[in-house]
Amino acid sequence: MVRHVLGLSGGKDSSALAVYMKDRVPDMEYYFCDTGKELPETYEYIKKLEILLGKPIDMLNADRDFDHWMWVNKGLLPSAQLRWCTPNLKIKPFEMWVGEDEAISYIGIRADENREGYISSKKNIKPVYPFKEDGITRDDVFKILEDSGLGLPKYYEWRTRSGCYFCFFQRQYEWVQLAERHPDLFQKAVDYENKVGFESTASEKQFTWTGKETLTELLERKEEIIEKHNQKVKNQLSVSNNNTNLASVLENVLDSDDDTPPCLACHV
């Protein structure tokens, strides 16, 4: 028997795909790779989605969270150059969950995106892309979520990518908003930086989430970052004659700050 599986990141695209496929594939299995460091809004959204889907979402990684793998990696922070978090917290748990079963993995890459998402190296797992096949775009995703009553996750008020609260792919404005909305989580991210410390006393190069400055230094520029962001939002709305979806505006503005593609297993 072939299993039909769909991974949820807590983001809009995978969630919209789950809603889209709900009646098309009744025997779909849903899973969420829990790093133990997700935003409260993400956990809340997953619970709402579980109710809408009418079946449980398997939570993976219950016994091996981020802190465990940071210890395994000798206390190093993950980074764009050393992404030990994605394979250990997203890919391996998924492949272990599927095992040797034949499985079709449904991936929420849209028709207006030029990427493929994570493709398992295991021959028993076959990826499919319903949104690409059916021409579903970003605007369609927003409509699917709105029409279903699920809507967007609350973090979409200030952040457009799912993932850990300290994800190194966050943009400056998102870090500032984390400090504003979840000061306890921001402080924990700072504590991680302080715990890792310096590469060497000679170079005085500190490991940081941003790779450029510490979070404390970034927060000292808070007003400048917010002002720059608000001006970009204003310009974007002016260009669109105020008719653009506000979530789309936020995505466009943040992508203009940094459009580096994040880890797809975390953010689809």
Image (cartoon, helix red, strand yellow):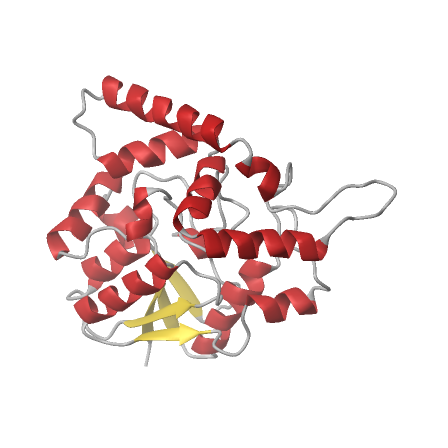
| Up/down of 145 relative to 47, above or below | above
Q: Is 199 left, or right, of 252 in this rendering?
A: right
Question: Residue 42 location in percent, x, y?
Answer: 35, 59
The part of the image, by quadrant, that contains residue 64 is bottom right
| Up/down of 95 relative to 106, above or below | below
Examine the rendering and report whether any part of residue 165 can be seen: no
Q: Is 97 left, or right, of 134 in this rendering?
A: right
Quarter of the picture containing the N terminus is bottom left
Q: How many marks?
A: 0
Instruction: Between residue 164 and residue 144, name the one nearer to us.
Output: 164
Instruction: Between residue 73 and residue 192, name the one nearer to us.
Output: 192
Residue sitting farthest toward the bottom = 1
Residue occupying the point 34% across, 53% down: 11
Question: Residue 90 location in percent, x, y?
Answer: 49, 64
Question: Residue 218 location in percent, x, y?
Answer: 56, 36
Residue occupying the point 16% across, 27% down: 243
Q: Is 172 left, or right, of 45 in this rendering?
A: right
Residue occupying the point 68% across, 68% down: 71
Question: Residue 14 location in percent, x, y?
Answer: 31, 56
Q: Is 244 left, or right, of 14 in this rendering?
A: left
Examine the rendering and report whether any part of residue 175 can be seen: yes
